[in-house]
Amino acid sequence: MVPALNAVVPTGSVALYWDFENLHAGLVEAVDPGAYARPDNRFKVQEPLVNVPAVIALAASLGPLSINRAYCNWQFFGRYREVLLESAMDLVQLFPRAAAPRTVPTSACASMRWKTWIAGRISAASWSSAGTVTSRRWP
């Protein structure tokens, strides 16, 4: 269960994991359904649509941000360079997968669970993907 944001009392640290290409694709699809699936749209340099500072501010409202990691095939997302550098984001390169090109591999999810749950120093983790921010708090 994810608590309402106005009911959260910041404690501990926060880990923010981004499924960046999926997040961007969700915003493209919101404007023009089916647009991101077209090869002439998807495999080219993408215009910035993700409000990175707003997502970071939302995650930081839960507590100090200790992990800020984004997973993506970065070759088409160079126009996000400035904001990603300003956000001190750890960028993880994912190469396209033929069967599921917009899917962050389970290894990324396992990494998130390990670093947040087992490490014990993170009390909240956020995963942003396809236009949503999902939060999980640990006691």
Image (tube, rainbow, N blue to C red):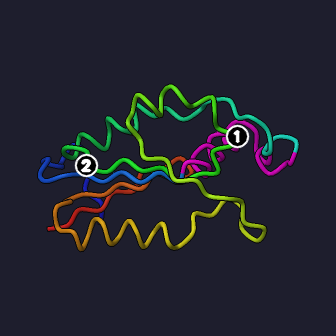
Q: Earlier in the sequence, mark 1 or mark 2?
A: 2
Considering only vertical position in the picture, is 39 above or below 31? Answer: below
The one of 60 and 65 positioned closer to us in this rendering = 65
State left or right for residue 58 relative to residue 95.
left
Residue on which disc 2 sits: 66
Quarter holding residue 1: bottom left
**Residue at left 64%, top 38%?**
77
> In the rendered view, does 8 fall on the left or right side of 4?
left
Q: Position of residue 138 (x, y in %)?
A: 20, 67
What stretch of residues is rendered in magenta?
20-39
Q: Pinpoint residue 103: horizontal percent, then vertical percent.
A: 63, 64
Quadrant (top left/top right/bottom left/bottom right) for the C terminus: bottom left
Q: Give the amino acid at mark 2.
A: Ser
Q: Amino acid at mark 1?
A: Phe
Q: Is residue 90 magenta?
A: no
Q: Which residue is mark 1?
A: 76
Q: Residue at x 30, y 58 (%)?
A: 125
- The quarter of the picture where residue 85 lies is top left
Q: Position of residue 86 (x, y in %)?
A: 40, 28
